[in-house]
Image (cartoon, rainbow, N blue to C red):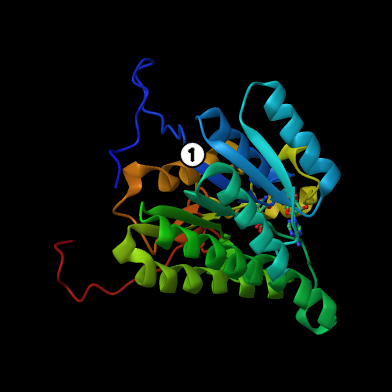
């Protein structure tokens, strides 16, 4: 493996640098994927946005290029094996390899399980879980041949571990991503390819994303967050950039929750609870 990622100490802070690293981000036309793509590009990465939304993806990449960053857009439906292979082959052909995959593509289906159609289930599971499988399989095959390690990061969700109503295919697909990451971590570890999940709580993506939760949903969610606020895109990007950097070389098969403590427990359980001490403490 190469030497650890250079860090920028000029401002007295440590920033991961990704100079000469080639990164593919799925779902990069919007929301968290877009922000992660931008942060990787700003940190010196050669970034490739892969998304089904051609217009939005093109605009995002044009914006990065006009800011002087090295970025390109590849229209890709992550559910489609051939399109994913084409994406990865094209990146490896153009840049000589691939170092980082961030799988952030996702769709929102919010319904009780009994009301879901077959198509709705398949759509969310296919974009979020099958897409993660196809993208990581393709990228890992190249990483294995390159023999210079690599980083695979799945964007999970607190729902991968904490069930929520109306989140059947979302929770199931994010739980599936966790186990897929763990299996990959075992299989790819000897080649210094790490595989981790960054699992956000509810993130206020503001104008970045077209996925907008209702005020009622945001209030209810924030009420379960010990840090008493929703997350920001940078909260997630900071975690992704860390696990994607060389500094995180000994972290694999891990789920990193970026959720203000939401996953730590239930804030709603309050009130007095008398407990018996059986005379073991002095009064
Ligand atoms: N925003 C949050 O609060 C939050 C919380 C937890 C997890 N997440 C996860 O983060 C990821 C991004 O979410 P977001 O809120 O930024 O959503 P978003 O809707 O803003 O972005 C999702 C992107 O995925 C793309 N996409 C959808 N189907 C695709 C396909 N078949 N192939 C390729 N691209 C496709 C969309 O075009 C879009 O650009 C998702 O995986 C989501 O589950 C988000």
Mark yes or no: residue 165 visible. Answer: no
Asked if residue 55 lies left or right of residue 269, the reply is right
Classify residue 249 as left or right of residue 153. left
Q: Nearer the viewer, residue 263 or 91?
A: 91
Question: Is 24 rendered above or below residue 8?
Answer: below
Q: Residue at x 56, y 74 (%)?
A: 176
x%, y% of residue 170? Answer: 68, 69
Quarter placement of the C terminus: bottom left
Q: Is residue 15 above or below residue 167?
A: above
Where is residue 54 drawn, in percent x and y?
A: 83, 47
SS at badge 1: helix
> Is 269 drawn above or below residue 48 in the view shown?
below
Q: Position of residue 202 (x, y in %)?
A: 63, 51
Q: Quadrant of residue 194?
A: bottom left
Q: Nearer the viewer, residue 79 or 162?
A: 79
- Which residue is at the front of the view, 3 or 205? 3
10 lies left or right of 58? left
At 64% across and 21% down in the image, what residue appears? 68
- Crowd tier of the residue under label 1, counting other residues whose Cα lies within 10 Å: few below 14, some 14–19, many 20 or above: some
- Ligand 1 under 8 Å from disc 1 Cβ: no
Is residue 23 at least partly visible in the picture?
yes
The image quadrant where one finds ligand 1 is bottom right
Which residue lies at the image location 50% right of the left edge and 30% below the top edge? 43
- Number of marks in the rendered image: 1
Name the residue that disc number 1 marks. Answer: 238
Q: Residue at x 58, y 60 (%)?
A: 157
Q: Position of residue 250 (x, y in %)?
A: 29, 54
Please name whichever residue, 238 or 186, is drawn nearer the observer in this view of the structure: 186
């Amino acid at each position: 493996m190469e030497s650890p990622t250079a860090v920028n100490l000029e401002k007295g802070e440590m920033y991961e640098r990704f100079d000469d690293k080639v990164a593919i981000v799925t779902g990069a036309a919007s929301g968290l994927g877009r922000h992660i793509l931008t942060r990787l590009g700003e940190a010196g990465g050669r970034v490739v946005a892969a998304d089904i939304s051609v217009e939005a993806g093109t605009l995002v990449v044009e914006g990065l290029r006009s800011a002087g960053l090295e970025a390109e857009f590849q229209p890709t439906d992550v559910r489609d094996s051939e399109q994913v292979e084409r994406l990865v082959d094209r990146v490896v052909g153009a840049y000589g390899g691939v170092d980082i995959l961030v799988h952030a593509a996702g769709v929102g289906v919010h319904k009780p399980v009994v009301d879901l159609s077959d198509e709705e289930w398949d759509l969310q599971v296919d974009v979020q879980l099958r897409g993660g499988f196809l993208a990581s399989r393709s990228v890992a095959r190249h990483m294995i041949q390159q023999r210079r390690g690599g980083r695979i990061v799945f964007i999970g969700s607190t729902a991968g571990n904490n069930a929520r109503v109306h989140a059947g295919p979302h929770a199931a697909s994010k739980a599936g991503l966790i186990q897929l990451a763990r299996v990959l971590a075992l299989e790819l570890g000897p080649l210094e390819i790490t595989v981790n999940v960054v699992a956000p709580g509810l993130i206020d993506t503001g104008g970045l994303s077209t996925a907008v939760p209702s005020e009622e949903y945001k209030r209810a969610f924030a009420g379960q967050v010990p840090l008493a606020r929703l997350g920001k895109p940078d909260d997630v990007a900071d975690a992704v950039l860390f696990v994607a950097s060389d500094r995180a070389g000994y972290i694999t098969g891990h789920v990193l929750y970026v959720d203000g403590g939401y996953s730590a427990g239930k804030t709603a359980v309050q009130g007095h609870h008398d407990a018996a001490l059986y005379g073991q403490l002095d009064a």
